[in-house]
Amino acid sequence: MLFSTRAEYGVRLMVELGRQGDTEPVALSTVTENEHLPLSYLEHLVAKLRKAGLVESQRGAHGGYRLARPAEEIDMLEVVQALEGAIAPMECFHPDPEGKVSCSHEADGDHACATKMLWTRVQGGVTKALGGTTLADLVEFAEGQTGKPVVAGAA
Amino acid sequence: MLFSTRAEYGVRLMVELGRQGDTEPVALSTVTENEHLPLSYLEHLVAKLRKAGLVESQRGAHGGYRLARPAEEIDMLEVVQALEGAIAPMECFHPDPEGKVSCSHEADGDHACATKMLWTRVQGGVTKALGGTTLADLVEFAEGQTGKPVVAGAA
DNA sequence: AACAAATCCTACCTCAGAGGTCGGAAAGCG
DNA sequence: CGCTTTCCGACCTCTGAGGTAGGATTTGTT
């Protein structure tokens, strides 16, 4: 499993917010009804999204959450990173400021960690897939097919 | 973390086997010396690789493991899948024989799971990265730089 | 002011799986 | 035979995922 349900639930939450207009806030209880997710758990997830500046909250009666930006300007890399933390394919993976990547067990005089090359490629693939998809894409996808199963075609 | 150390250790094992000639088998103890990995744990991992038909074993004294095929013909998707199991980005992800993907919570009359589109893309990215890399690539990479750190550049 | 609806926050619980160890059986050398 | 190595299953520990509970705080409505 590449990602946990945190990403799953969180993304569904974001899509749900995108489906509602961004005029008035949506309460979590509304989301849990539509998506059948545990409310108290969602609270934790949405907190991460809020801290990441992806959603805004309004407290009190008739409060709730709304997107901090239009869905077109939210790419899913941000969302997933906010929920899951940094996307490192592997424990021994420490990208530094520039594009370099250092590997934990490279320190000892070993021949360099060959797997680094592989994980770098994988990470590139994931990052590209996530970064190239906006929330608006998902919302549109969800709107389009309300119920009927469809072939999932996307690279 | 996208993958666990199973993939890490297993890939390093495969690279190590690739570095040695495929003429005579390499004992696990040799690998653990070079890579500083726990032997008893490696035993479990190599068992998976053997069952997947990626390595062959020779028992008894002077026994060990060798690649079942030349490194050029082993792509890393096979290797990682053998070690980690099927590469599904998400729990709710059940690809069927044809390219379709069905989603667990699609069953209840909900509007279709929008995240499906996202996970499909992510999986595509990972699969492409892994499938497009052969063991020979990694072996070459490891041979090339024996010690000195290098910029990791690969998409 | 009182109430209700909502977010916010901290602490806690449970369980599966990662990561690893151990002991021994079987197989193939010399 | 004895040594080396793969093979196999049982076991152990600890972390994090996934979720629950309870209350504090904010804000709209009556």
Image: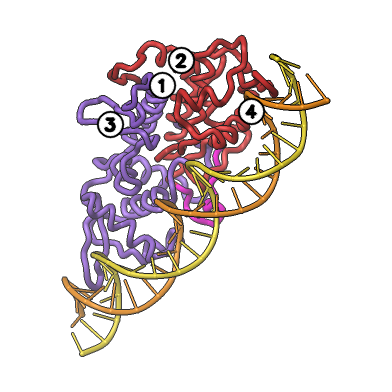
Chain colours: A red, B purple, C orange, D yellow
Given the image, what chain letter belongs to the residue carrying mark 1?
Answer: B
Q: Residue at x 37, y 22 (%)?
A: B110
Which SS class for mark 2? helix
Which of the numbered marks, if any, corresponds to residue A52? Answer: 4
Identify which amino acid the numbered label 1 is placed on.
Ala
Q: Residue at x 34, y 20 (%)?
A: A154
The residue that disc 2 covers is: A139
Q: Residues within 10 Å of mark 3 (few under 14, many from 20)?
A: some
Q: Earlier in the sequence, mark 1 or mark 3?
A: 3
Q: Name the quadrant containing residue A122.
A: top left
Identify the magenta region.
Answer: A100-113
Whether labels 1 and 3 belong to a single chain: the reply is yes
Q: Residues within 10 Å of mark 2 (few under 14, many from 20)?
A: many
Whether labels 4 and 2 belong to a single chain: the reply is yes
Q: CA distance from mark 1 to mark 3?
A: 16 Å
Q: Name the quadrant containing residue B144.
A: top left
Give percent across and percent down for residue A44: 59, 36
Whether labels 3 and 4 belong to a single chain: the reply is no
Mark 1 touches mark 4? (CB < 8 Å): no
The residue that disc 3 covers is: B95
Identify which amino acid the numbered label 4 is placed on.
Ala
Give percent across and percent down for residue A138: 44, 17
Whether labels 3 and 2 belong to a single chain: the reply is no
